[in-house]
Image (cartoon, rainbow, N blue to C red):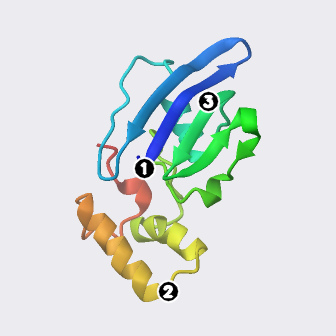
Amino acid sequence: MPTVSLREVSKFFTDVPAVNRVSFDVEQGELLVLLGPSGCGKTTTLRMIAGLEEPDGGEIFIGDKVVNAPAKGIVLPTEKRGIGMVFQSYAIWPNMKVFENVAYPLRVRRTRPAIIRDKVMQALSLVGLEGLEERPATQLSGG
């Protein structure tokens, strides 16, 4: 079973289709890139998977669980989906350093401090930001 699956997913804003009957599967470990011009529904599609927008039609699965199915009245809340989303414009806390921005979701989940430190350092290493954990987050380059 795919990790994420969309079946005939649609979203309308007023009468304008933002996403029109989109279907695809993303397998465990697979990367999928959504490409297209501004306004074609890329961000709306990702927001629906994350639970930040509700589709008007179709079904969204995460693993073997239906997380959205308007015709069946199924809407799993964002916080129960077990996924995250990186926004195209940063959503950082300007009053926090890099480490604290990355650690925030783990702190909200009341993760043990030693585990937070390990996971944050792994994440920073993965994206090439090791050594910058004490830098104010607003001083990172967008590139």
Tell me how far mark 3 sits from mark 1, CA to CA: 17 Å
For the image shown, how many numbered marks are present on the structure?
Answer: 3
Q: Residue at x 65, y 32 (%)?
A: 55
Placement of the C terminus among the 4 image quadrants? top left
Note whether residue 71 is visible: yes
Indicate the position of residue 109 as horizontal and vertical percent values.
58, 74
| Helix, strand or loop at mark 3 | strand
Indicate the position of residue 139 as horizontal and vertical percent values.
37, 55
- The amino acid at mark 2 is Arg
- The amino acid at mark 3 is Gly
| Helix, strand or loop at mark 1 | loop
Tell me if mark 3 has few (under 14), some (14-19) or many (20+) residues whose alpha carbon lies within 10 angstroms of its own.
Answer: many
Q: Residue at x 26, y 57 (%)?
A: 127
Q: Which residue is drawn at 44% across and 65% down?
A: 102
- Closest to the observer, 110 or 104: 110
Tell me how far mark 1 sits from mark 2, CA to CA: 28 Å
Query: What is the number of the mark on residue 58?
Result: 3
For marks 1 and 2, the one nearer the N-term is 1
Quarter of image, res 36: top left
Q: In this view, does 15 lie above or below 111?
A: above
Q: Which residue is drawn at 29% across and 52% down?
A: 29
Find disc 2 in the rendering and name its residue. 112
